[in-house]
Amino acid sequence: MLRPVFSVLLVLLATSFAKYIPKSGKRIPQTLSRGWGDQLIWAQTYEEALYWSRSRNKPLMVLFHLEDCPHSQAFKKVFSDNNEIQKTLDEFFIVLNLVYETTDKHLSPDGQYVPRIIFVDPSMTVRADITGPYSNRMYAYEPGDIKLLISNMQRARKLLKSEL
Amino acid sequence: MLRPVFSVLLVLLATSFAKYIPKSGKRIPQTLSRGWGDQLIWAQTYEEALYWSRSRNKPLMVLFHLEDCPHSQAFKKVFSDNNEIQKTLDEFFIVLNLVYETTDKHLSPDGQYVPRIIFVDPSMTVRADITGPYSNRMYAYEPGDIKLLISNMQRARKLLKSEL
């Protein structure tokens, strides 16, 4: 007669140790990379990114995108698959990707659109001079613009002299 | 004589498709949960969290911690293992965990320390009245304080009336 009691206890024990699972089913944990480079160390917030940029004297790349935007998705594919971009970012840049705008208007020199890439110098100066190929959306890039982005990254690596 | 050439081509092909791996070895992608609840949907920034809180009319829990702080780690263990906390947060709260302070001083009513839990009402009012058991660090919690945290979560769910 001990067996059923023991089984009930086992079930109770298993239930109490089971981790929470939402009603809608188990979710894949969100990553900070959001698919833009799982091997890169991403800052979580703009404040954190600025702090790292200043303290490590590395330029910052801020990448605005949206998960459900097909232009963002297409660009993300070539961006994350490009080893030159990934290696250069990992070694010489601070990286931040955001799906929400910040309160800093300097990060949207010609409007809030996605995908949009803004470089910031360790002196905390937004490099509004480093632009993509489109005159109406100066900080937008498309999959075919990867080479321009790489040369823009080289430009961003030549740091401005801090006037402080 | 074709075989060696073919092998070389295969190696080249494999190399060009290989994803970037840092010199120091492959990294585990960072998650937004940082171990505080992999099944929860975490906001990335305070601005994003406030936006969700207002638009969904749910209170916000902001959790300040540090990865290398033993108090944070001990509290994270009981917090992430507690199904009542995880379920309540998932269904009734907006959640944000931060390893850096924000520029908003309302989030550090009695100083910047970790672990620290601050509730914010959807009216964007910081609930400085919802405190833990320690008079010197009013928003700190230890593993033994989980029940108080749960009752504080119930208090936070009773929304303030917006005076707007």
Image (cartoon, coloured by chain):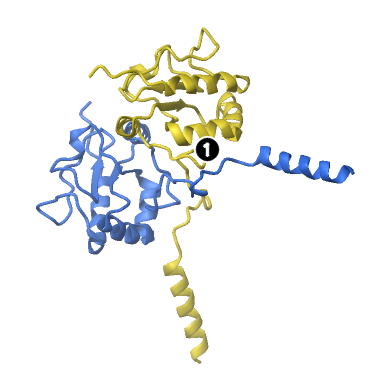
Chain colours: A yellow, B blue
Q: Is mark 1 on a helix, strand or loop?
A: loop
Pick the quarter of the image with the C terminus of chain A. Answer: top left
Give the x, y percent position of residue B63.
29, 46
User: Residue B2, located in which quarter of the rendered image?
Assistant: top right
Residue furthest toward the front? B1
**Kind of residue at badge 1:** Gly
Q: In this view, does B108 lie to the left or right of B74?
A: left
Give the x, y percent position of residue A24.
52, 50
Q: Is residue A73 left or right of residue B50?
A: right
Return the residue at label 1: A37
Q: Which residue is drawn at 47% across and 84% down?
A: A5
Q: Which residue is drawn at 26% across and 35% down?
A: B102
For mark 1, does the 10 Å Cα neighbourhood hold few (<14), some (14 to 19), or many (20 or more) residues?
Answer: many
Give the x, y percent position of residue A85.
54, 30
User: Residue B62, located in which quarter of the rendered image?
Assistant: top left
Residue furthest toward the top? A135
Give the x, y percent position of residue B87.
39, 54
Residue at mark 1: chain: A
The number of numbered badges drawn on the structure is 1
Residue furthest toward the bottom? A1
Q: Which residue is drawn at 77% across and 42% down?
A: B8
Q: Is residue B37 left or right of residue B129?
A: right
Work out whether B37 lies above or below B78: above
Asked whether B1 or B11 is in front, the reply is: B1
Residue furthest toward the right? B1
Q: Is residue B81 left or right of residue A134?
A: left
Work out whether B18 lies above or below A127: below
